[in-house]
Image: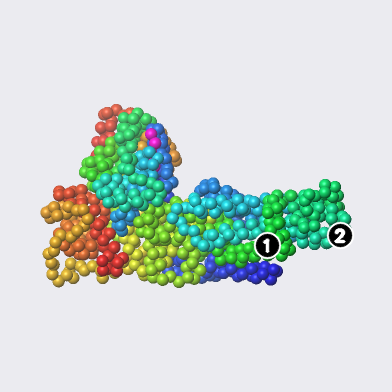
Amino acid sequence: MKLAFFQGCNIPIRIEQYAVSATAVLRTFGIELETIDDFTCCGYPVRNVDETAYLAPSVRNIALAEKRGIDIMTICNCCFGSLQKARHAMAGDPHLGETVNELLAKDSLTYHGTGSVKHLLTVLHDEVGTPAIAAKLSHRYTELKVAVLHGCHLLRPREVTRFDDSFVPRITGELVQLTGAANLDWPGALECCGAALAGINEDLSRSLLLEKVQGARVAGAEFIVPVCAYCYLQLDSVQATEKGDPLPVLLYPQLLGLCLGLSPEVLGIGLNSSIADHHISLLESRLGPPTTEKKSRKKARATAAA
Amino acid sequence: MDMLLIIAFLIFLAGLGWRLFTWFGKGFNGHDTAVSTGRRIGSALTAVGATISSGRLLKLVRSLFVDVLFQRRLLAKNSWRWAAHGLLFIGFIGLLLMHGLGYSVSTFFFSNYESTLQPFLGLREFFGVLVVIGVGLAIYRRLTDRPKRVRSYASDWLALSLVGGIIITGFLFQSSQIASHAEFQEMVDEWAGLDPDDPESVALETYWAAEQGLVSARVTKPFDPALVEEGAAVSENYCTECHAPASGAPVSFTLAKLVGPIAAALGDGPATSLLGTLHLLFCFSLLAWLPFSKMFHVIAAPVSLLINGVAGFKNPAPDAATTLNRQMIGLSACTHCGACSERCSSLTFYESFANDFILPSEKVQYLQRIASGKNLDHDTTKRLQKGLYICTSCDRCSEVCPSGINLRELFTHARYYLLSKNVPETSILSHFSFPLSLLRTFGTQHLHALKTIEQKFKTAFAKLSELGSITMNAPAEVGANNYLACYSCQRCTNICPVVRGYDNPQETLDLLPHQIIFSLGIGNKDLAMGARMLWSCSTCYLCQEHCPNNVALTDIFYHLKNGALDKLEAGGTA
């Protein structure tokens, strides 16, 4: 299987390890990612300014992938949300289609609406499938409490993103449990990291971020796992400017990658600025055999919940 | 001619001086603190000294070969362009050193150097052909494969014309020399000392006319083979020592067959000297124009590449002085090749906003002009500022720039430099501000620019408290919407993580989410557009997701934000 890897603007320069670890994990399952140089920004940053200018780039990016006959995969929620919004809008608004296709004609592109947009987590959960992942595991965490921060534009609005149940998402939970780690139920899991307000209302942006960090800490999280690139940057870079030790941030392909026998170096875990060497040692020390007795798993969950 | 050369050289020197002055005297400083020229020169000298005296010298040499001479970055970008540049570079430098500066450089290495001897005669042709192919490729690219949306300016064509002109006039000059009878006569007189009527002279002329492209009125076809043979012997005797056969310059030799008769008809003496003069004029023009044009990249690009090669392409400058120096060196190293715009993440935004300045290559052209002292009018400032702001800070432009310009740093500084002029920039209220906020370098300047916009909001939109009475009108239009289904259950406000964060939210946010919908319901869109709630909305979509009547609150908020900024851009009257 081959997918067009849509990395967006932040990942290649600020979170290269997200792309690298996702690529390494998917390669384990025979999924090949193709980078398309002509991809541009998804449009998200301009949404406050002009809705059509926001939609046009995503339509163009989908058209680029359609031309190559492959589907798009993203790892950034805001890119995912924008691409899905573009598909949704193009399906419902013929006037928009006219405007945008006229613009695309300059690059000899046409949007047909045949290509689909996937998220890394959907690719793992639906295309690869949890049983296939489980079969490839070389390790599972014997004990590890993680708080997943879903990010908003992955889940909502549900009729646009079509990712999962936006109130009770299952995909993330199942993927985390696969690794043996406990997926904490915590109040901030479905809420905002504050990134959308950064540079517009700094204080509010920061307080939303700190509320998430605090929430995850109170729930007993050892690591926080953001799905979105923006959430990651808020947690990993902005949190670093706060006093005290940061709550370490791990990306899902890094969490899963260790269980697939990939090394922390390959997964770029050390590149996360909130991660110190002792965090990596801790993660490695918690790696156990790939299959666990039902009993002990229950026990692990009970400890996690405590 | 010597006088012209001196004038051209003086202009070149003056231009060079002016460039150095801008390198260390101008720049876009996004910070408030001024940096003196003295400090900037000092910091440049320190950096050079530190490089030479440290182990980084090796890096410098490596960068010289890999980045400057081999043009690794260009190769990675486009092999055709790399080939065109390589041909131009090798050909032009070869000609400059071997031919242009022949009697100082070539004689230094080869004591027997004569421009009329092999291998120099042939090499000159070879280098010339390289340049012609390079120019041809460059013209072809500009016409067909040119980066989409990047404009070609008159200066881009002038650069190609001058370089091409030098070589073409060079070839024509050479071919008319080959064919010229006057030239032949002069040389025979000077080197062989033969009288024109001497039988040896006739034989020599027959040989050169038959075999070496000379156009002669006296000896014409059919040539007497015996005379040709005799002439060859005479040539061997008098000429060969310092004049290789003209056929050793195949391009000019072939051209001579075409040019010769025309020149002869026009009078070959004057024609030859005219072509020679033209050739020199082209050379002098390029020399004089070089420091004032993009051709200055021949000096600035190697400097820029070496600095980045040693200091690291991604590392930020250590201090303000170095930042400004690198900025100006970078600006002067731009060749307007358009590689940056081709890879620009904001490419589609350029289409939507129809603003040239969104493309990095076009921003650079204008920033160059400002740096060289051009004043900015209000409209251009606004457009340039918007162009600088509609940027995702993805760094792809810096990564692909063949001249190694740190465009991201340049643009960030230029952005805050312009914002400091207090022209409000509405795009600051977009997520383009996110990476800037992440940088944390321009906190004060950013807040200041936000305040300017806030002030504009205050004058453009009335607050609820400022309205004497509230009138009820027909519900406002907010695109395709369904907000009329709202029955004021306030679920949106109750679920909102922003509202939750304030003790007295209304004081900070003006209107709460359900109140915004209510304002729309009574037809007061302006009240909704002016509410600070919109710019405090984290766009988390919780309200929209939780609304029992499926009111698309967040989407409506986006619509209102777009409308509010449009109104501000239109001067608050739309």
Q: Main secondary structure of the magenta part?
A: strand
Q: Which residues are magenta?
A: A1-5
Whether label 2 touches label 1, CB < 8 Å? no
- The residue at the point 88 percent across, 58 percent down is B198
Q: Residue B349: name its quadrant.
A: bottom left
Image quarter of the N terminus of chain A: top left
Q: Is residue A276 left or right of residue B288?
A: left
Secondary structure, mark 1, is helix
- The residue at the point 25 percent across, 47 percent down is A92
The foreground one among A186 and B243 is B243
Q: Earlier in the sequence, mark 2 or mark 1?
A: 2
Q: Amino acid at mark 2?
A: Asp
For mark 2, what is the residue? B197
Image quarter of the C terminus of chain A: top left
x, y (%) of residue B86? 59, 50
Dot label at residue B275: 1
